[in-house]
Image (tube, coloured by chain):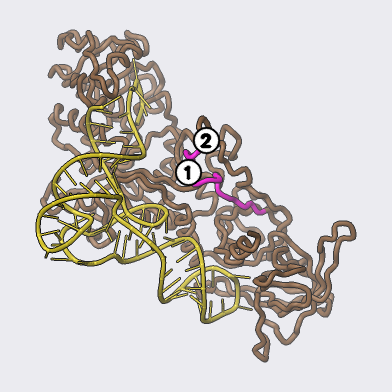
Chain colours: A brown, B yellow
Amino acid sequence: MTTPDFNRPSDFIRDIIKEDLRTGKNNSRVHTRFPPEPNGHLHIGHAKSICLNFGIAKDFNGLCNLRMDDTNPTKEEVEYVESIQQDVRWLGFDWQDRMYYASDYFERFYECALDLIRKGKAYVCDLSADKMREYRGTLTAPGKESPYRGRTVEENLDLFERMRAGEFPDGSRTLRAKIDMASGNINMRDPVMYRILHADHHRTGNKWCIYPMYDYAHCISDSIEGITHSICTLEFEDHRPLYDWFLDELKVECHPRQIEFARLNLSYTVMSKRKFIQLVEGGFVTGWDDPRMSTISGLRRRGYTPEAIRNFAERIGVAKRDSVVDIALLEYCIREDLNKTAPRVMAVLRPLKVVIINYPEDKTEEMDAVNNPEDPGMGTRKVPFSRVLYIEKDDFREDPPKQFFRLAPGREVRLRYAYFITCVHTVKDDKTGEVEELHCTYDPATRGGDAPGGRKVKATIHWVSADHAIDAEARLYDYLLTQPDPDDVEEGKDFRSIMNLNSLEILSGCKLERSLTGAKPGCKYQFERMGYFCVDTDSSGGRLVFNRTVSLKDTWAKVEKTLKK
RNA sequence: UGGGGAGUGGUGUAGGGGUAACACGGCAGAUUCUGGAUCUGCUUUCAGGGGUUCGAAUCCUCUCUCCCCAGCCA
């Protein structure tokens, strides 16, 4: 058992909990829950909530349940409950034996409904959906009471039992709470507690044909599980009076406190199930786990680590105001993690052939390369060097601008862990004039990368020996949107009008150092100077596919950009 | 025009009567066998008006702006 951590960065929710602990509320217990509806895949917004709920439990020596909020059989599927469990586990959280389903409580909900009917606090209403909307009133005008509001307890009991028995068709009746049709809070205008739905539920099958609504089911679920702090997002703020109303009327022992926080928005991406579906169906991405998606599965496939995401969740904080977090912070978090953990490797994404004309044709040397300068414990490896190499196209410029330090005609640079080379000749395509091969000389005295006299070069570039290289495909990703805010679009258009149509660039024929042979999906590397890459699940047999998780910070790219202006 | 929330630098989060802090970003520089990492410095803020006070981001008051709510979705 760990001691509660009161020292970690606090937030308004933890402040409330600390106060409750101080005053001995809830017998000094802390119990939260993460309650997704299994109707879609989790995204990084959910990760914020997961980290919050499980994190609070951990900080205060409490517990956090995982609960499927499965009260709507028409939308929920087992496929989703499995993916949700996988994602939560992957993020590093453990609900132990506390995996719950709202559907497990259906009988309890029913009993409670009976109780409310007997107390005259709930009634069966025969209004159609359209009529009910009409009776509800508007934001500014009060509603009208349903003509069925005055039914006797006996009649209500009879009708409700028959609703359960399946005597009535979908939509013909509802069970409603009897509260106040004139309330300024529309949620309190006799909200529906049960609707008739002759639909198979993924867990209860055809046992039920009436299903409870969120507001009714959620508070009771929390109460049953002994939740102390029921944390949800801002849009439920004006549902809180109803949450409290049900629990007060039912006189339950455990009455959790609902606390609302602002959901996460991330710049240059979308964050709602509806928009994700539009992306998938519109063919903008290949699926829920497309590495450009901010779904947990997408981020995982992209090469993000649970550590980075947890760290991100901590850095963004928790508050009540609407905000848009700069995606640069997420990128910072993954770079921070991978910088410490990812082995370095040399990979040429856009190869340019280089012949070292004064190097023997049949010779191969094994150069020592450091696996991770941030972590000497990760050791070294041998990288083969020979006469014909590949370097990055971007590392050569025939007419280098002033700030360009890399290879150019007549200029000397260092090949990382190998030799200094000087470009003495360029071979061009007759027709296009494009440089297709470089002839260079090397200085044998610089073996390993250092000149004996302390001679300096301005750049070190990576390379791969042509004869020893393995081929791979690299997928480079860019933001999904061309603008930070998905809703900042022209009148009448939606986020699809600001899609970045170049968010995926596929590079084939990349040349990798041979140590990457047989790398397995999920393996993460830093391709030196190019970014962090992760083996994609599309890899098979000898075919290697890499996702670029995130590029390295690139000062040269910035300089070049301002140069172009 | 009803009800519920929220306004602190470019972004996010602290500070809750004593003169605004941390992180990311941006910009410089140092350093470096990754134009990476690291280090240093700079950048810029309390929505507005009035009031209380020796002193207000903080308390009071008025105003403005933004977000959410009219599913038998969650």
What kind of residue is marked 2? Glu
Q: Which residue is mark 1?
A: A485
The percent coordinates of residue A214 (x first, y second) are 30, 29
- In magenta, the rendered stretch is A474-490
Question: Which of A107 and A256 lies nearest the eye of the viewer?
Answer: A256
- The answer to whether residue A489 is magenta is yes
Residue at 70% x, 83% y is A447
First of labels 2, 1 by sequence position: 1
Q: Is residue A107 above or below residue A292?
A: above
Residue at 85% x, 60% y is A433
Question: Which of A210 and A263 lies nearest the eye of the viewer?
Answer: A263
Q: What is the spatial separation of the Cα atoms under label 2 and label 1, in whole angstroms?
A: 12 Å
Question: Judging from the image, what secondary structure is the residue with disc 1 in?
Answer: loop
Residue at 57% x, 59% y is A551
Dot 1 alpha-carbon crowd within 10 angstroms: few under 14, some 14 to 19, many 20 or more? some
What kind of residue is marked 1? Asp
Q: Which mark is residue A490?
A: 2
* Quarter of the figure with residue A200: top left
Quadrant location, the N terminus of chain A: bottom left
